[in-house]
Image (cartoon, rainbow, N blue to C red):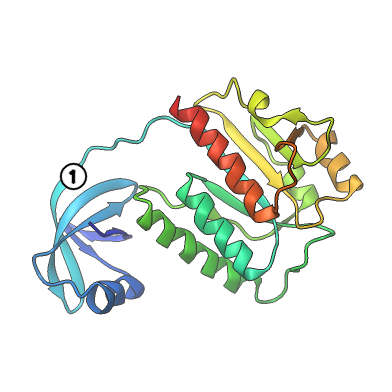
Amino acid sequence: MQRYFVTKKKDDIFSFSTEDNHHIKNVMRMEIGECVEIVYENNLYRAHIISLEPVQAQIAEEVPSKDAMKPYITLAQALVKEQKMDFILQKTTELGIDEIIPLTTVRSVVKTNDKTCQKVVRWQRIVKEASEQSKRTSIPKVNLPKSVKEVALLDYDLKILCTVNELSKNLNKVLSNLSKRARILFVIGAEGGFTKEEEQYFLDHGFVSCSLGSLVLRTETASLYVMSVIQFLLSR
């Protein structure tokens, strides 16, 4: 059953965004009477299409939440080229990320410019669609890009610096006592990693240096590895 996130509700009637109107009518080719899943204010409903001009749906029932208590997880991802960034946004959303901070670093190939705000709008649309596809009841927040210094000063219960430094702690051990109420921030660099100065700045501000294993992962693989480990630990 197709799932949509909506922000407009009057009594027991939901209205959809322009993009979702198009998707329902022209892509899914739904008809009046068909059932859809609606997420409104993090609550899940089943609803029937009652109008196509514009598309509206009426509540059939509210679905009890099955979301278990879990940590709040934020990824600070160094800016990478568009296709890789899209992939990271989509896949980390499917794996349960709560917030994403695009990170400007010395070795970032992509730099911020006047069109950055437009990119954030596009990125937010990507995570919305990934949330619908993966049957989430929340959409990750995508921030405007931040600098290394801004991210280093953020307040979290656990702050993880992903690195290839062989002396770093093992990620599994760092997460072994993971609290289901914890707020976790992990940072991942661009293709060339962080500079020594950037790594030291993170370490000086409470970050734990973590290894992702003996293999050197691409930047778009690293975030998926971390989120997969977290999901595994939460499911035990």
Q: Position of residue 174 (x, y in %)?
A: 67, 26
Give the residue displayed 84% in from the left and 43% down from the top: 199
Q: How dense is the environment of label 1, judged by Cα within 10 Å: few (below 14), some, or many (20 and up)? A: some
The extreme top residue here reads: 177
Foreground residue among 121 and 127: 127
Quarter of the view holding residue 212? top right
Q: Quadrant of the C terminus?
A: top left
Q: Quadrant of the N terminus?
A: bottom left
Residue tagged 1: 62
The extreme right residue here reads: 197
Foreground residue among 232 and 102: 232
- Is 74 positioned to the left or the right of 110 in the image? left
- Is 190 positioned to the left or the right of 101 in the image? right
Give the residue displayed 67% in from the left and 31% down from the top: 171
Q: Position of residue 166 (x, y in %)?
A: 83, 34
Q: Please, what is the three-letter code of the amino acid marked with disc 1?
A: Glu
Give the residue displayed 76% in from the left and 28% down from the top: 169
Against 187, is 2 above or below? below
Count of numbered labels shown in the rendering: 1
Against 76, is 226 above or below? above
Against 30, is 105 above or below? above
Give the residue displayed 81% in from the left and 40% down from the top: 202
